């Protein structure tokens, strides 16, 4: 049987983001207040959890892959008492570098679907940008826009073209929405 998964954007969805600021110091990392509560609920509902993140700061030369890994390690440490993250995927490329992994391009999602035997139809993508929503659609998952970090501005900017299945205040709102869908079955 195939697994079901929650794919999550990192910055502005799972951890706090100051728009325009590239996080490279693990000590500056903060989870949202509701992150662990949301991840616990996803785990309880039987979802495998993944992070899919665009990290163009590497391609732009703002920080190294080693620094990024240190930030991700700290994130996993803060999350670990609440939930298990199966894997963290990231695209290191700058926007002007052609690649197939910078969201909304589908490669990170396709790799996860294949490696972890995921059923996209039973899975969700959660993020605070249109590129997250489009990424979800590109891999045939339903998508939730969260209104943390860039979410509100993105909702306003793309209101006529945003194809989110649901818009929620934050990641815990997304978790409650998905729990509600489970209850309908
Ligand atoms: Mg984001
Ligand atoms: Zn890439």
Image (spheres, rainbow, N blue to C red):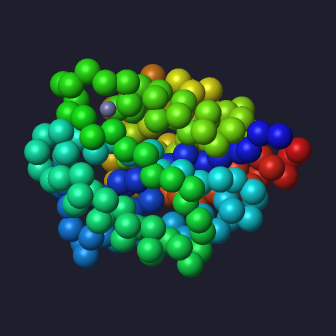
The residue at the point 51 percent across, 66 percent down is 35
112 sits to left or right of 180:
left
Kindly give the residue lying farthest to the right in the view shown: 185
The residue at the point 75 percent across, 57 percent down is 46
Location of residue 116 (image quadrant): top right
The residue at the point 38 percent across, 67 percent down is 73
70 sits to left or right of 8:
left
Q: Position of residue 99 (x, y in %)?
A: 31, 24
Residue 116: tell me if it is visible: yes
Kindly give the residue lying farthest to the bottom in the view shown: 81
The residue at the point 83 percent across, 40 percent down is 1
Location of residue 25 with respect to 55 vertically, above or below = below
Kindly give the residue lying farthest to the left in the view shown: 61
Q: Position of residue 19 (x, y in %)?
A: 24, 52
Location of residue 24 (image quadrant): bottom left
Location of residue 110 with respect to 154 vertically, above or below = above
Q: Position of residue 152 (x, y in %)?
A: 38, 46
Residue 174: tell me if it is visible: no
Location of residue 37 with respect to 89 vertically, above or below = below
Q: Quadrant of the C terminus?
A: top right
């Amino acid at each position: 049987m195939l697994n079901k998964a929650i794919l999550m954007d990192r910055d502005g969805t799972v951890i706090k983001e100051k728009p325009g600021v590239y996080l490279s110091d693990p000590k500056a990392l903060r989870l949202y207040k509701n992150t662990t509560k949301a991840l616990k609920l996803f785990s309880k509902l039987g979802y495998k959890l993944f992070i899919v993140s665009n990290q163009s700061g590497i391609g732009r030369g703002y920080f190294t892959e080693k620094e990024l890994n240190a930030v991700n390690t700290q994130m996993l440490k803060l999350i670990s008492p609440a939930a298990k993250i199966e894997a963290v995927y990231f695209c290191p490329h700058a926007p002007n570098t052609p690649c197939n992994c910078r969201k909304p391009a589908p490669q990170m999602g396709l790799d996860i679907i294949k490696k972890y035997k995921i059923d996209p139809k039973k899975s969700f993508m959660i993020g605070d940008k249109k590129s997250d929503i489009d990424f979800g659609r590109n891999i045939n998952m339903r998508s939730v826009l969260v209104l943390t970090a860039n979410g509100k501005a993105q909702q306003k900017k793309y209101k006529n073209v945003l194809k989110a299945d649901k818009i929620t205040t934050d990641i815990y709102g997304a978790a409650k929405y998905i729990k509600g869908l489970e209850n309908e079955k």
